[in-house]
Image (cartoon, grey):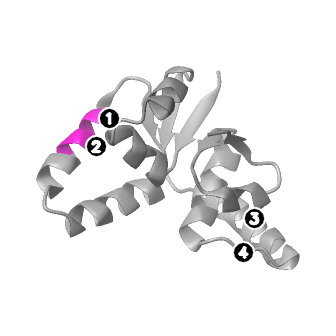
Amino acid sequence: MERLLIDTNAYTALMAGNTEVADILNRFAVVLLSPIVYGELIDGFRQGSREKENRLILERFCAKPRTTRLPITHSTAEWFSEIKHTLRSKGRPIPINDGWIAASCMEHGAHLLSFDSHFDAVDGLLKYPI
């Protein structure tokens, strides 16, 4: 069963009505949400004028039967360390939160849906093309 982890910018695009993102999500039986992405979203909501409404929308998204919230585990930390070390040795670091997001994808064998091209530097990451 193929899984897709949605990045913060892909969730934001989905909520803005991006039909391409919606179509991609519909191709996967399982949609994963990292606590890192969840935290970035909540942080963004706090900076806006519709925090309560946006939180409710996010909770409805999380409550869908095919959406799974992931934990951060010791395995995630191992993946994060490997990714960070490899990218540092290549001279191609990525933002720290994105390292954790990539680690969650690797741990769970999930594709990543993101508009960020710097994820392309992560060896073995299954990034869904958008």
Q: Is residue 121 magenta?
A: no
Q: Is residue 34 visible?
A: no
Q: Which is the main secondary structure of the residues drawn in magenta?
A: helix
Please state the horizontal and vertical placement of residue 122, each as a whole percent of the image: 77, 58
Q: What is the three-letter code of the residue carrying label 2? A: Leu
Instruction: Measure the alpha-carbon separation of dots 2 and 4.
Output: 30 Å
Which residue is under mark 4?
Answer: 93
Q: Quadrant of the C terminus?
A: top right
Camera-side mark, 3 or 2: 2
In the image, which disc is placed on residue 83?
Answer: 3
Q: Is residue 126 visible?
A: yes
Relative horizontal placement of residue 111, taking residue 82 as reference (left or right):
left
Query: Is 20 rendered above or below residue 101?
Result: above
Q: What is the three-letter code of the residue carrying label 1? A: Phe
Q: What is the three-letter code of the residue carrying label 4? A: Pro
Instruction: Measure the alpha-carbon separation of dots 1 and 3.
Output: 29 Å
Which residue is under mark 2?
Answer: 58
- Is label 3 in contact with label 2 (beta carbons under 8 Å)? no
Badge 4 element:
loop
Please state the horizontal and vertical placement of residue 35, each as a whole percent of the image: 44, 55
Instruction: Measure the alpha-carbon separation of dots 2 and 1.
Output: 5 Å
Q: Say which quarter of the image contains residue 101.
A: bottom right
Task: Answer with mark 1 or mark 4, whichever residue precedes in sequence.
Answer: 1
Task: Answer with mark 2 or mark 4, whichever residue precedes in sequence.
Answer: 2
Which residue is under mark 1?
Answer: 61
